[in-house]
């Protein structure tokens, strides 16, 4: 059973940094990809960053330079560090996982920043940035 549990959200000030965590599931020798997404009410879920089993990463163009995605395979923890937070970063942040997948190229990685590529989702953690 694939389970994802996010934590680390909260209320912060503009300019602060925040690191979100997500525990995920793996199965021996199975490929997978993990992604961070965010959503505000009334808008589509937006891809933030993603990483595959081999630690290849992709970050949304609009967030490059402020966001780092990483994971620890020993304890199945995924992280998202966001620096220089802005009020427009306010959203519910979700982690997601798709089994049996990986990044085959840079273009393929960017394509897998789409929410529809992921079957398993956590419940989300709220991030609120005040100016």
Image (cartoon, helix red, strand yellow):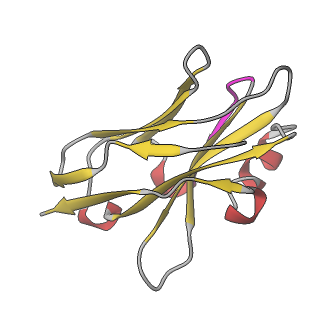
Q: Position of residue 75 (x, y in %)?
A: 55, 19
Residue 19 horizontal/vertical position (percent): 34, 37
* Residue at x 31% of width, y 67% of height: 88
Q: Residue furthest top?
A: 74
Q: Which residue sits furthest front?
A: 1
Quarter in which the N terminus is drawn: top right
Task: Judge whether 53 appears above or below 36 on screen.
Answer: above
Residue plotted at (19% across, 44% down): 16
Residue 112 spot, x, y in % from top left: 75, 52
Residue under the image location 86 percent in, 21 percent down = 29
Residue lying at the far bottom in this picture: please name it. 42
| Residue 106 percent coordinates (x, y) | 77, 41
Q: Is residue 93 left or right of residue 96?
A: left
On screen, residue 17 versus residue 32, left or right, reads left
Q: Residue at x 67, y 63 (%)?
A: 115
Identify the magenta region: 54-60
Tag count in the figure?
A: 0
Q: Is residue 97 magenta?
A: no
> Would residue 59 be visible to someone looking at this image?
no
Quadrant of the frame with the C terminus? bottom left
In the picture, residue 7 is in which quadrant? top left
In the foreground, 121 or 101: 121
Question: Can see residue 128?
Answer: yes
């Amino acid at each position: 059973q694939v389970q994802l549990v996010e934590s680390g959200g909260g209320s912060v000030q503009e300019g602060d940094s925040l690191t979100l965590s997500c525990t995920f599931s793996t199965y021996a020798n199975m490929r997978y990809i993990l992604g961070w997404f965010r959503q505000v009410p009334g808008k589509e879920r937006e891809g933030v960053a993603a990483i595959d089993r081999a630690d290849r990463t992709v970050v949304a163009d609009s967030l490059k330079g402020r966001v780092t995605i990483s994971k620890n395979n020993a304890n199945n923890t995924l992280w998202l560090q966001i620096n220089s937070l802005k009020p427009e970063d306010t959203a519910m942040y979700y982690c997601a996982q798709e089994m049996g997948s990986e990044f085959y190229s840079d273009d393929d990685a960017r394509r897998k920043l789409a929410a529809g590529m992921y079957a398993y989702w956590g419940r989300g953690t709220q991030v609120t940035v005040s100016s």
